[in-house]
Image (cartoon, helix red, strand yellow):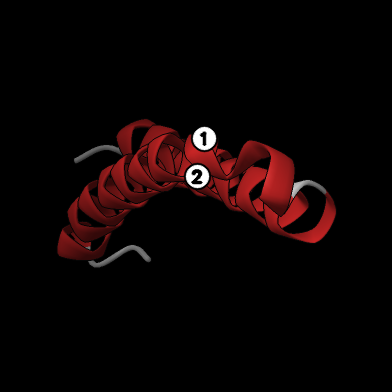
């Protein structure tokens, strides 16, 4: 794997982590501000957050496998 490939993979890991964090932030905002009015949207937010975490974990595993983490 070239240095550019590793750099691109690190960027992908970072982007996927940011996306997962954004979903977590939406869950936090819902719980803090509008839980009793908007609780029906919680399962979908949780599903999206879980999926984003899985995608981050897969990218992180690929990066870790290069030994360049």
Q: Residue at x 36, y 52 (%)?
A: 53
Res. 3 visible in picture: no
Q: Which residue is mark 2?
A: 42
Q: Is residue 56 left or right of residue 37?
A: left
Residue depicted at x 33% and y 63%: 68
Residue 8: x, y in percent?
42, 32
What residue is shown with label 1? Answer: 41
For residue 27, side relative to residue 14 (left or right): right
Mark-to-mark CA distance, 1 and 2: 4 Å
| The N terminus lies in quadrant | top left
The residue sitting at 46% across, 40% down in the picture is 16
Q: Secondary structure at mark 1?
A: helix
Check disc 1: other Cα within 10 Å, few if <14, some if 14-19, many if 20+. few
Q: Is the residue marked by circle 2 packed among few (<14), some (14-19), or many (20+) residues within 10 Å?
A: some
**Residue 32: percent from the left, percent from the top?**
80, 60
- Classify 47 as above or below 63: above
Name the one closer to the observer, 21 or 66. Answer: 21
Q: Is residue 62 left or right of residue 40?
A: left
Q: Secondary structure at mark 2?
A: helix
Residue at image point 28% right, 42% down: 55
Q: Horizontal placement of 59 versus 25: left or right?
A: left
In the rendered view, would you say 47 is above or below 62? above
| Rendered position, 33 above or below 6 | below
Q: Nearer the viewer, residue 1 or 51?
A: 51
């Amino acid at each position: 794997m070239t240095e550019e490939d590793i750099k691109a993979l690190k960027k992908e890991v970072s982007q996927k982590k940011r996306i997962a964090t954004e979903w977590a932030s939406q869950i936090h905002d819902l719980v803090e501000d509008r839980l009793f009015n908007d609780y029906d949207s919680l399962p979908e937010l949780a599903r999206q957050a879980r999926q984003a975490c899985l995608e981050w974990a897969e990218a992180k595993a690929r990066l870790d496998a290069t030994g360049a983490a």
